[in-house]
Every structure is written in structure tokens, then in C-alpha cells.
Image (cartoon, coloured by chain):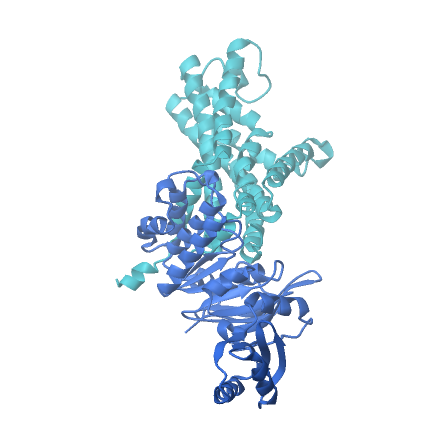
Chain colours: A cyan, B blue
Amino acid sequence: MSAVAVRFRRPGVATVYAWEVRKLAAQKRTYIGLGCALLVPLIFITALLADDEGPEGIPFSDLVRETGLAIPLVGLYFAAFWFFPLITALVAGDIVATEDGNGTLKTILTRSVDRWQIFVAKVLAAFTYAFVALVLYVGVGLVIGGLIWGFDPLISLSGSQIPVDRSLSLIGGTVLAYFLPTMAVASLAILLSTVTRNSAAAVVATLMLSLIMQLLGIISALDFVRPYLLPAQFNAWQGLLREPIDWAPVIRASWVSALFAVPALAWAFTHFLRRDVAGG
Amino acid sequence: MTAIEARGLVKRYGHVTAVDHVDLTVRTGDVYGYLGPNGAGKTTSLRMLLGLIRPDEGSARLFGRDPLLEGARALEGVAGFVEAPRFYPYLSGRRNLELAAALDGGDAAERIDDALETVDLTSRASDKVRGYSHGMKQRLGIAGALVRDPRLLLLDEPTTGLDPAGMRDMRALVHRLAEDGLTVLLSSHLMAEVEDLCDRVAIVTRGRVVYEGALDELIASTSGRYDLRTTDDGPAAVIARRAHGIYDVTTSSRGLSFAADERAVAGLTLELAQAGIGLRALVPRTATLEELFFRMTESAPDGEPILVST
């Protein structure tokens, strides 16, 4: 390869993605999100140790003091209401808008990478952060819960006992199923971040959207809408913990999440590609 | 080869036309001053050149490539900053340059040390950018540009906000880069800076270019008046008033002043010599760039270029 060819070899998406992750790793906001993902399960476990009551009426709540494997599952149920949308929006809502605020968008757009590469890298970095937060949230609950209450087998939602090794695999599957609507929330946050160019507005608006969907889900007259809203998809993992596995909610979570994520990302992508970068 | 060729650039924001049919031609090797008052549309023009904003009309090409059509490929060999260089405050200066080099690809990372050395930031390279002074950020901006090993450098008011020593150092740096063969487009509202650094200029006001051409030609175009001191000013004034092509002769305690073209001035000196009058001083009086700038930017009628040279 000639020297000239080496000199002008342009970076790929992987390079831009790696630097997006490094930027996230250098920001306090990332650690606030990850810190909360770590802290909340600890608070939940402390509350269980401090009081013999509750939680009641939710999946696996009667197992929380019998096996540590139930801790992350109960935690996931609670986190679906607003906690995980907030953790996700905290970074995904900031990832484009902060570059506008700092004026650094023009810095990276005048190098040798195209706009689409930067956008794709940012989306992947936001998803990576959300996945790490999710793994951390589940992992802390699982490990600390297991150390306190042991790693005894789970009882499935169908009433059958699930061996420990299979329970652990299913918890892994649960994380993946939970990640589907999480990506949809992240996509909405990225859209708002791109369009509003205001980090705080994007984070708050994403959280508000999640809460509005929660509200729509509890209005009985709108029962027919509930299966197609994101909050319901945050509970799709429960299908994995039935015997036999009920894949229907997981499959629905896949396409409903895609129904939210794909248009949001397409809109954000088009906007990012065509917009004027006039600030900073 | 033409480094920058902009034709008919227009950018409107609502009812305001920020850039109004701007044509720019920067030839390879030029140190080109883009001179205009604040709000004249200089930064908007530069953003259009770099593909950061879309013109409503017209097009821009850098070394023959349109950034809007060819994206990052059109920016190969092009570097600089608009408005002010911006960096990630939570990363160190070196880390910021590493990021920039990674996004440049090729062997850009190998130039980081040299770039830091050039802008005299090696000792502070490990500090977070949030702790940098304005001048240090400006210099880091230059370093970020040099990492790309550019052929064309676009600098938007690089000395704004710098103290006198910082301004001197920045100008010296631009001088040095230009001497190394870089083509430089320097946007500025500082006359002394442009006069010091540039060989060609475009003067822009209210979004329109009112002059484009060589700086020395612009200044020479306003000459035509001379101050004269002789061994005997009285008879010299009489001879001057009678001489062909000499007009508007005035006298004062400091000597004579008159308007003429160069040929008539040569004839006058011969006539004075033949009359036995010696010349103590003959000085062409030219307008400064600052005088020209104000003349052009404060009196330019809307829609009409005052003078465009090529």
C-alpha cells in the first residue's frame, strides 16, 4: 500500500464507536447512571433485611427471602416503572445534545468521518451503556442476594421448580428480553437529544413519555392499547420463567420495541444528517 | 489548483440574509484574509465551506470537492476551526488530540507530539482541557488542525480573546505555517492582523463581498497623493502647479502635497532638478487597510460590490 493511501485511510464506525465509549467512560453522568444501577439493588436488599414484610403481589416476591435468584427478577419488575427509563435516558438523552452544548459536534464533523458514522457510533454507545447498566443492576442483585439468601432453585411462574443452572440461564435471557424495550427507550431519548439539542429537555421528555405510557396502561378504557406500549414489554421476560417457556410476550416485545425504536432512529438519523451545525 | 472555490453562496435565517451571493477564490499557497465586521457573515461562510451548514443557494468546493456531496472525503487535507476551537473539557489536551487523530485515520496519531510542540503545549498536554486558558484552547485548536497534516487551514478569528503576547505568538505561528507552504484562510475583523499576514483579501459586509483581490493592489489602488519637501518649497509649488498631470497642489509648513499619477511625478522631479531645487522627501500617501475597510464597510450600498479585483 502506498504512503498516500495509508495517510488517507479513513476510520470506520468501530473506531468512532470506541471513542464514543471512551467519552462516556470519562463523564460523570455515566457513573451517576451506573452508580444508581448498582445502588438500587443494594437498597432493596437492605430493605428486605430490615423488614420481614413485603413485597407482595408481584412475580417472585414470595421467593425473595428464599433464594437470591429471585432478587434481580423482583428488581427488574420495579425498575420498569421509571427507574430504568431514567437510567437509560440519562445518557442516551445527552449523547447528541451535549455535543451541541459544548460545540464539539463541529469538531468531530470536520475530521475524516461522515455524519452517518458518528450517528451510528453514538447509538451503539448509548445501547452499550444501557446494557452495562442492566447487567450491573441484575448482577449486583443476583450476587449479593445469592450471598445472603443462597442460590436455591427458582419456582417458575407455572409452579414448577427450575434447577439453579437453568435459572441462571433464564435470568440471562431475562436481561436480553428486558433490553428490547430498553433499546426502544434509548432510541426515543436519542431522537429527543438530536432534535431538541438540549440534554435536560431530552432526558426529562423521555422520562415523561415513559410515564405517559404507564398512565395509558392503567386506564381501563384503553386496555386494547396496553400490549402495544413499552411498559408492557418491560414485563415480557416473565414469559421466559414459565414452564414451558411462553415466547409470545418476548416476540411481541421484539416487534413492539422495534415499532418505537426504528422510526425514532430513522427520524433522528435523517435530522442529524441534514441539520445545520451552527452553534458553538 | 484552487484550494477554495465558492460561488454564489447564500444563507438566510428567516428574513435575515446572513450570506448574500458570496464568491470566494483562494488559490493554493495564498494566505487569504476574510475581513469583515462582526456579524458580516464570515463565520457562516466558513461553516458552509466546511459542510457544517447547507447553503440555500450556491456551492463550495475545497480542492475541487463539495463537502455537501462528498462528505468527509471533501475535507481531506483541510483543517481548522470556526468561531472557536471546541474540545471535550473532561479529557486532557493530549486525549482530545488522540480522539481527533483517531477520527482522521491514517498516520495522524504520529503527529500529535509534533503538533503539541509546535503550539508549545507539551508541558500541559496531560491536563484536562477544562483547566485551559482561552489562549491555550486556541493553540490546542491549531494543534488539532496540524494533526491532520493539512494543505488548507481555515482559521476563524484565531487571536480573538488573546492577550497581546498571545496574539503575537499566534500570528507568528500562522506566519510560520504559511511559510511552510500551507494555504491559509484567515477570517478576522482585525486589520493589523490581516495586513500583517495576508497577501489576498476579501472584504465582506452585511453578507456581501465588497472587495476580493490582492492586498497590495487594494492599497495601491488608493494611492495618487504625494507629500513633497524640497530645498525651496515656494518655487517648487509654482513649478508643481504649472506641471502637466499635477493637481490639487497645497502648501504648508511641512512642504507640498499634490495629486498625480506616477508618470507625472517622475516628470515633476526632473523639472525641479532642472530648476536647481533639490528633493528632501517625496512620499506617496496611501490609505491604510483600516481606512479602506471602514470606507467599504460603512458606505457600501446594499447590493453593489464597490470593487472586485481578481
Query: Which quadrant is home to the N terminus of chain A?
Result: bottom left
Closest to the observer: B9 or B93?
B93
- Tell how many labels: 0
Closest to the observer: A238 or B191?
B191
Tell me where residue A205 appears, x and y as whole percent: 64, 39
Tell me where residue B119 appears, x and y as whole percent: 38, 50
- Left or right? Give the position of A48 relative to B56: left
Tell me where residue A249 appears, x and y as whole percent: 54, 36
- Left or right? Give the position of B121 relative to B5: left
**In the image, residue B300 above or below residue A26:** below
Q: Which residue is painted at 47% across and 47% down in the image?
A: B135
**In the image, residue B158 above or below residue B309:** above
Residue A158 visible here: no
Tell me where residue A263 appears, x and y as whole percent: 58, 50
Q: Which residue is painted at 44% across and 28% down in the image?
A: A136
**In the image, residue A5 above or below residue A18:** below
Closest to the observer: B65 or A270?
B65
Residue B139 visible here: yes
Going by the picture, which residue comes out furthest to the right?
A221
